[in-house]
């Protein structure tokens, strides 16, 4: 320049290849590995925190059977079969429906859903893993109740192998219903109330034969997912079980379980984004 001043140029931006590269996000976990991880974590948690409640559920069912033994005769009658089958499935209702509704209600109220939302796991894995863990947790209580009830009411034990299908199918239906109640209830107290009402309905309508109930109550009984598990188990106590009816009742349990778990998954997505 003529005036002797020195003109300084602005610093040029660094080349793009000098900028630090942004690391790509890790891919989300697959459904089955995520489901297995959530299932193991929930089963471990339930084993520590829910064992006392499992004893309560089992002793409650055993107490109902002992109480009803004073008014129901032993042998392969409709009343005896209904009491034993209903008391056995009641263990599933207490844990999978009642406790799972409380768990998801508490998880939503405490912000625990935010933790799951940050993990690279599908919502389906969270719901199915928790439901499967709670349903699996009921197996010892159901077996003890069914065997003790069959002995107490002088019913045959040969058909109890059907519990292999009754527990997971009825457990899936009831666990899905419990999870949906816990996730859809606007308050934790309402989730607990829904779980308690569902368990009470399974108790009152599951241990009595349908023939002696009013027509309106029968319709209500048919709406309960646990009813079909009770009917399937009760049919195995007959001298000559109708396995076609057992398969039909288990099929209804399976369909209701798929629908209930799908609703619970939708409810989880809905609650997690709020």
Image (tube, grey):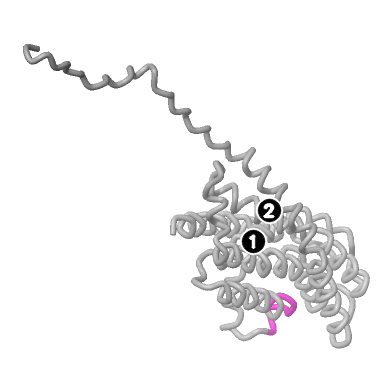
The percent position of residue 252, horizontal first and vertical second, equals: 61, 59
Q: Is residue 253 left or right of residue 17?
A: right
Q: Quadrant of residue 232?
A: bottom right
Q: CA distance from mark 2 to mark 1?
A: 8 Å
- Residue under circle 2? 132
- Residue under circle 1? 175
Name the element at disc 2.
helix
The percent position of residue 201, horizontal first and vertical second, equals: 65, 78
Residue 98 visible = yes
Residue 210 highlighted magenta (yes or no): yes
Q: Nearer the viewer, residue 268 or 92?
A: 268
Name the element at disc 1.
helix
Whether 185 is drawn above or below 272: the answer is: below
Q: Nearer the viewer, residue 72 or 163?
A: 163
Please identify the quadrant where the N terminus is shown: top left
Residue 227 visible = no
Magenta segment, which residues?
205-212
Residue visible at 90% across and 69% down in the picture: 148
Residue visible at 92% across and 72% down in the picture: 154
Q: Which mark is residue 64?
A: none
Marks 2/1 in contact by CB < 8 Å: the verdict is yes
The percent position of residue 116, horizontal first and vertical second, equals: 57, 51
The percent position of residue 230, horizontal first and vertical second, equals: 72, 68
Residue visible at 62% across and 51% down in the picture: 128
């Amino acid at each position: 320049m003529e005036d002797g001043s020195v003109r300084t140029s602005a610093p040029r931006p660094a080349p793009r290849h000098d900028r630090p590269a942004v690391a790509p996000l890790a891919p989300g976990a697959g459904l089955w590995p995520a489901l297995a991880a959530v299932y193991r974590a929930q089963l471990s948690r339930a084993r520590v925190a829910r064992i006392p409640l499992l004893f309560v559920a089992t002793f409650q069912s055993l107490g109902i059977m002992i109480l009803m033994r004073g008014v129901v005769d032993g042998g392969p009658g409709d009343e005896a079969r209904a009491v034993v089958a209903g008391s056995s499935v009641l263990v599933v209702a207490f844990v999978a429906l009642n406790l799972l509704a409380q768990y998801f209600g508490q998880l939503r109220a405490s912000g625990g859903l935010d933790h799951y939302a940050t993990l690279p796991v599908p919502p389906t894995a969270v719901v199915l893993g928790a439901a499967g863990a709670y349903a699996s947790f009921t197996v010892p209580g159901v077996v003890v109740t069914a065997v003790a009830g069959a002995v107490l009411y002088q019913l045959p034990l040969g058909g109890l192998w059907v519990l292999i299908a009754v527990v997971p199918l009825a457990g899936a239906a009831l666990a899905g219903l419990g999870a949906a109640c816990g996730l859809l209830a606007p308050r934790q107290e309402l989730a607990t109330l829904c779980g308690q009402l569902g368990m009470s309905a399974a108790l009152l309508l599951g241990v009595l034969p349908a023939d002696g109930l009013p027509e309106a109550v029968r319709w209500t009984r048919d709406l309960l997912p646990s009813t079909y598990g009770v009917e399937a188990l009760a049919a195995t106590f007959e001298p000559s079980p109708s396995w076609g009816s057992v398969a039909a009742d288990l099929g209804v349990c399976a369909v209701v379980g798929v629908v209930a778990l799908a609703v619970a998954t939708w409810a989880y997505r809905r609650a997690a984004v709020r």
